[in-house]
Amino acid sequence: MANTDTVADPTATNFFESLLELFQQAHNPDLCEAQNILLRRLALQGDVVGSRVPAPQNITEIGGYLNLLRESKQEEMLAQVLAGILGVAGPNPPLGWTPPRPPLRMVPLANDRPEGASQGAIPLWFMVRSDFYSALQQGRNRLHEQGCVLPLSASGRRLPPALSLGPAPTDLLPYLGRCLELVPATALNDPAADLLALVRPTDTTEAFRIAARVLAPGSVPVLASDWDAIKCDSSSCMVVQITGGEFVPVAPILASAGFYSPTPLPEPVTILSTEWTRLTNCTGLIRGKTRLGDELEQLYDTAEIGASVFATMLSWLWDGSTFVQP
């Protein structure tokens, strides 16, 4: 009896193993979409979904099928058949279920990580919603032109599943891609050397504001001035004076991108205080009209929303500070 066993091509095997590992570790939107396309194509191949008609025996029968599809105005299926005959990839998106992609997504943005004591605490990347991306980058560029940096932190969040233990989160804005945080380790240690500081003009009673320290002269000069700044340790905070300091308030720059600090700005009480680092973007949220479900659909597909703890909260309305049950 002839040996019908075949020996796999090791090069092809290594290629497909590497491809499989790549897709298993997919974390950015493009790789995830490629993964979905491959899975849909596998589900729709003839050896997985059995054909209800015998394979064509000759070119005449193939022509008959093509004519039938053309007369039935099945243009996408016709393209798939031709792709199968020629052995090339079919149209994209392929035939079958193709859930609509949300209009927005979270995209990575490289962080500002200058050398110094706080560099190790600054993440390499942070995630920002795609519709906020350009304005935020433009704002950071304005700071860079003045010799400053703006270390930020934010990660993409999965919706908590409906079966998760405990109540639904009360802070919903992070799940809508509407929150960023300043990296706490970049301030409050030594205002004269930190990347960020909480400052106010010396000998005034103005509220403290978040400012970026000029690290090196930029293309846009910054005037030196005298400042009061907050310095903290593990048990308390104190006000120190900085003579001839070069600081740039970040609030106007962040506001141009739609991000705002709490008002009034919470003053820290120890080095561990982080309330002052929170930035929120409520652009487009209309009091009494914007529904939580509409906001979730900007970032998540229907199946993910339906399986989350927010599935019963889709009709909740924005009240100016959070979403509440109508």
Image (spheres, rainbow, N blue to C red):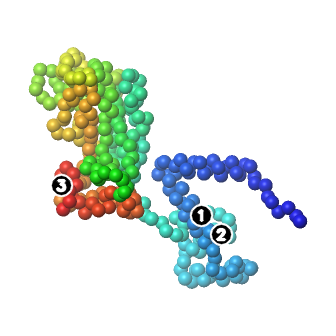
The spot of residue 262 in percent (x, y) is 20, 40
Q: Do the residues labelled 1 and 2 touch (CB within 8 Å)?
A: no
Q: Residue at x 23, y 41 (%)?
A: 260
Q: What element carries label 1?
A: helix
Q: What distance separates the C-alpha of mark 3 from that of mark 1?
A: 46 Å
Rendered view: 206 above or below 297: above
The spot of residue 30 in percent (x, y) is 50, 52
Q: What distance separates the C-alpha of mark 3 from that of mark 2?
A: 54 Å
What residue is shown with label 3? Answer: 319
Q: Are marks 3 and 1 in contact (CB under 8 Å)?
A: no
The spot of residue 12 in percent (x, y) is 71, 52
In the foreground, 174 or 126: 174
Q: Which residue is drawn at 79% across and 55% down?
A: 7
Q: What distance separates the C-alpha of mark 1 from that of mark 2?
A: 9 Å
Q: Which residue is drawn at 65% across and 52% down?
A: 16
In the foreground, 112 or 304: 304
